[in-house]
Image: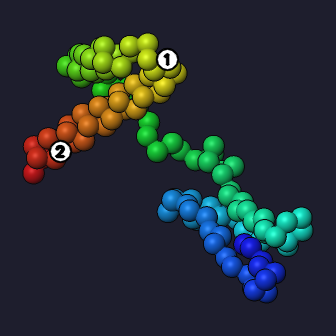
Amino acid sequence: SFFSHAHKAYSRIDFFVLSRGLVSRVEEVEYSAIAISDHAPHWVDLGLGEERDQRPLWCMEVGLLADEEVSERVHGGTERYLEANDNGEVRVGTVWEALKAVVRGELISIRVHKEKADSVETD
C-alpha cells in the first residue's frame, strides 16, 4: 500500500496470487504500518509444514515395471527423451527433473489405459 501525502489518501494495489490448493493453507495475513518509507509491508504465512506428513499425490506403481511391454515402452521413451534433450545446452539437473516428470506422465498414462481396459472387460 502507498500513502500519498499530496492527496492525503491511501492507494492499495496489494494482493497475493495463490493457487486454489494454497488458499486453504493461509494461516495469517499481516498488513503492517508504514514505518520507513511511504509503503507498508505485508505478508502471508502459509502452513506448509504438514505437507511432509501427507501421502504424496502420486506414488509409482512398481508392478507396472514388471510388465515387460511397459518396461520397454518406458525405456524407449527415456532414450528418445535423452537423445532430444541431453545435448549439453541444458543443465544436467534440469534434464533429470524433466525426465522424471516425463516418465511419471508415461506411467500414469499406462495405468489409466489399463484401468479403462479392465473396466470394459468387467462390464
In the structure shown, which secondary structural element does the residue marked by tag 1 occupy?
helix
Q: Nearer the viewer, mark 2 or mark 1?
A: 1
The image quarter in which residue 1 lies: bottom right
**Is 88 or 78 nearer to us in this picture?**
88
User: Quick one: label 2 or label 1, which is nearer the N terminus?
Assistant: 1
Q: In the image, is 80 to the left or to the right of 47?
A: left
Percent x, y of residue 52:
63, 43
Q: Is residue 85 visible?
A: yes
In the image, what residue type sits under mark 1? Val
Q: By what rule are the colours in the image chosen?
A: rainbow
Label 2: state its secondary structure: helix
- Which x, y percent locates residue 100? 42, 27
Mark pair 2, 1: CA separation: 36 Å
Q: Is residue 13 above or below residue 50?
A: below
Q: Which residue is mark 1?
A: 92
Vertical placement of residue 84 versus 13, above or below: above
Q: Which mark is residue 116?
A: 2
> For the point 44% across and 17% down, which residue is it?
89
Q: Residue placed at 69% from the left, 49% from the top?
A: 49
Q: Residue at x 11, y 47 (%)?
A: 120
Measured as percent of width and height from the top left, residue 81 is found at: 31, 20
User: Can see residue 71?
Assistant: no
Tell me where residue 12 appears, x and y as whole percent. Answer: 67, 76
- Figure quadrant of residue 30: bottom right
Are discs 2 and 1 less than 8 Å apart at CB?
Answer: no
Q: Which residue is at 75% across, 65% downward?
A: 42
Figure check: 90 above or below 8: above
Q: Is residue 72 left or right of residue 56?
A: left
Q: Nearer the viewer, residue 115 or 121?
A: 115
